[in-house]
Image (cartoon, rainbow, N blue to C red):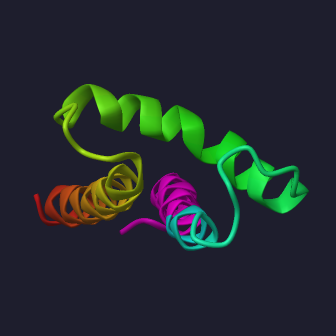
Amino acid sequence: MEPQLSWVVQIPNYVLAALMYTLLARFVLSFLFAPDSPNYIFRAFVRLTDPVLAVVRVITPAAVPPLILLIFAAIWMLFLRIVLVVAVVGAAQA
């Protein structure tokens, strides 16, 4: 991989990783706090992950409960990270 292209891969990978771990943190914190909790840390996790959950909700069956949707969203972020790395490695070999 060329040095000038590494940031093009690393920044999206970093953003996807941050979203994945934020979704997992929200999942764990949801066992400690109510959904309408005034805790500012939990509210920050909710605000950061709600747009991701809205996208995942479109491609996930409606029967999936909200807590499981968090896990599905984290799995989708992991899948996107893998696709990104495979695409870059494939493009570098071509």
Quarter holding residue 64: top left
Above-or-below relation of 53 to 83: above
Q: Is residue 10 left or right of residue 87?
A: right
Quarter holding residue 48: top right
Q: Quadrant of the C terminus?
A: bottom left
Q: Is residue 38 left or right of residue 71?
A: right
Relative depth, front residue between 37 and 77: 37
Residue 79 x %, y %: 24, 60
Q: Main secondary structure of the magenta part?
A: helix
Q: Is residue 94 left or right of residue 48?
A: left
Q: How many marks?
A: 0
Relative depth, front residue between 28 and 9: 28
Residue 83 x %, y %: 22, 57
Residue 52 x %, y %: 48, 39
Residue 17 x %, y %: 50, 66
Q: Residue at x 52, y 60 (%)?
A: 23
- Extreme-left residue of the structure: 94
Q: Quadrant of the N terminus?
A: bottom left
Residues drawn in magenta: 1-23
